[in-house]
């Protein structure tokens, strides 16, 4: 699915400094607000989070562990090192926590509370809901999760890394990557030329994002029953029949959208692959467990 996989994977070359870069902390829901038809903003706080996690901004990702039905707190090995993933896998399947990847939309510099925007898929159209979206839909203050996230603002779970000579930034995203687009636009220096395309399920999901960059954001509202990502992929291809060699492209969202646009920029337009950051955030018809299992099988071949 993603060549630039920014989720935290034990068993990769990042192992050497995993313990220093990441922490597993308990987090408590302090607020749950439906910010738009498809998005629920959950604010996480708590002592361990305040002491332990530091977001680097932009598209900072983290891993959230949700409790199983009937459990209060998710079951996760607490010490994060190179053996962590093996210990997690060794827990009984029906007991170990449900693991999902999300983006830090923002972190309050004083309270250190984190906002995460969850897409409530399954409420619109045909796609089934999953445990993370269902958890977010019902979340209330006091609910607890475990977070595996960055202990240092400089960490490897940020994919948006434009080279210093980038003349223009191009962003393409669906609604799962809208939080990342928000974080990126807020972080960019004044005057940076940006063209962004964001596809959302509902016109009510359009957002005002504060940015000092010189940004043009094109919003695409999916047709009912439309395949996620198709509208944004078509719009970007139509708008960009060529591209500046020094542009930097960042693509995230449903796997088909990511594949189509990466191919467009790298193969069809000849942009150097180091200038195209791409991350599949989900795939239509597959749960995150299925995607992880596929990746592990691929890595073992
Ligand atoms: C680095 C990274 C950052 C991410 N950041 C965010 C974020 O900030 N906000 C966010 O909402 N998501 C984000 N995602 C995507 C999120 O992890 C997936 O959507 C995840 O599958 C949701 O888990 P679930 O338990 O709800 O569904 P799963 O159990 O994983 O999947 C159940 C079914 O729902 C489908 N499905 C999953 N997601 C969607 C969707 N969005 N729309 C329609 N159908 C879907 C699946 O294809 C499957 O058929 C991110 C993913 C990555 C890798």
Image: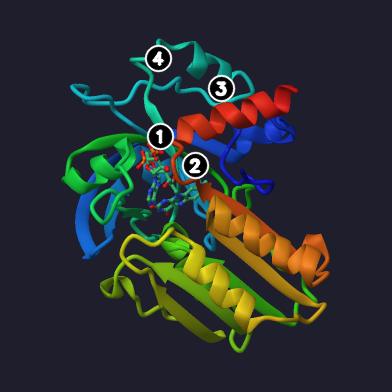
Residue under the point 41% across and 62% down:
175
Asked if the residue at tag 2 contacts the one at tag 1, i.e. Cβ–Cβ closer than 8 Å, the answer is yes
In the rendered image, is residue 115 in sight?
A: no
Badge 1 is on which residue?
25
> Disc 3 vs disc 4: which is toward the camera?
4
- Give the label, 3 or 2, closer to the camera: 3
Comes first in the chain, label 3 or label 4? 3
Q: How many labels, in total?
A: 4
Q: CA distance from mark 3 to mark 2?
A: 14 Å
- Identify the secondary structure beneath mark 3: helix
Q: Residues within 10 Å of mark 1 (few under 14, many from 20)?
A: many
For the residues marked 4 and 2, what is the alpha-carbon distance in whole angstroms?
23 Å
SS under mark 4: loop
**How far across and down, in percent of the image, does residue 268 sit?**
78, 68
Q: Position of residue 274 (x, y in %)?
A: 80, 60
Which quarter of the picture shows residue 108? bottom left
Apparent side of residue 127 relative to residue 142 in the rendered image (left or right): right
Q: Which percent across, then down, holds residue 210? A: 42, 80
Tell me the distance, in whole angstroms, between the alpha carbons under discs 3 and 4. Answer: 13 Å
Q: Position of residue 166 (x, y in %)?
A: 75, 77
Label 3 CB-ligand 1 distance < 8 A: no
Q: Nearer the viewer, residue 156 or 235?
A: 235
Q: Which mark is residue 85?
A: 3
Task: Kindly identify which numbered label has been placed on residue 93.
Answer: 4
Earlier in the chain: of badge 1 and badge 3, it is: 1
> Which mark lies nearer to you, 1 or 4?
4
Identified at 24% across, 65% down, the residue is: 35
Of residues 38 and 46, the one nearer the viewer is 38
| Residue that extends furthest to the front in the rendered view of this protein | 225
Near mark 3 (Cα within 10 A), the count class, few <14, some 14-19 or many ≥20, is some
The numbered mark, 1 or 4, whose residue comes first in the sequence reads 1
Residue assigned mark 2: 149
């Amino acid at each position: 699915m993603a060549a630039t996989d920014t989720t935290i994977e034990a068993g990769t070359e990042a192992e050497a400094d995993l313990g220093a870069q990441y922490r597993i902390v308990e987090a408590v829901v302090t607020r749950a607000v439906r910010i738009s038809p498809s998005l629920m903003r959950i604010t996480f706080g708590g002592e361990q989070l305040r002491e332990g996690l530091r977001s680097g901004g932009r598209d900072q990702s983290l891993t959230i562990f949700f409790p199983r039905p009937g459990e209060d707190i998710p079951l996760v090995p607490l010490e994060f090192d190179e053996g962590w993933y093996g210990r997690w896998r060794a827990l009984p399947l029906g007991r170990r926590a449900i693991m999902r990847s999300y983006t830090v939309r923002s972190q309050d510099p004083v309270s250190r509370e984190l906002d995460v925007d969850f897409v409530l898929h399954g409420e619109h159209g045909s796609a089934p809901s999953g445990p993370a979206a269902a958890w977010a839909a019902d979340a209330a203050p006091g609910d607890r999760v475990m977070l595996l996230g960055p202990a240092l603002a400089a960490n490897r779970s940020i994919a948006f890394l434009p080279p210093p000579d980038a003349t223009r930034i191009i962003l393409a995203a669906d609604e799962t990557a809208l939080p990342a687009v928000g974080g990126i636009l807020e972080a960019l220096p004044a005057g940076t030329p940006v063209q962004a395309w964001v596809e959302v399920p509902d016109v009510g999901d359009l957002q005002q994002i504060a940015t000092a960059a010189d940004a043009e954001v094109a919003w695409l509202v999916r047709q009912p029953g439309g395949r996620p990502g198709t509208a944004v992929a078509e719009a970007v291809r139509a708008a960009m029949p060529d591209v500046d060699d020094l542009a930097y492209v960042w693509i995230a969202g449903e796997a088909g959208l990511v594949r189509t646009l990466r191919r467009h920029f790298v193969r069809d337009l000849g942009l150097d692959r180091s200038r195209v950051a791409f991350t599949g955030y989900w795939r239509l018809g597959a749960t995150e467990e299925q995607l992880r299992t596929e990746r592990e099988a691929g890595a073992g071949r």
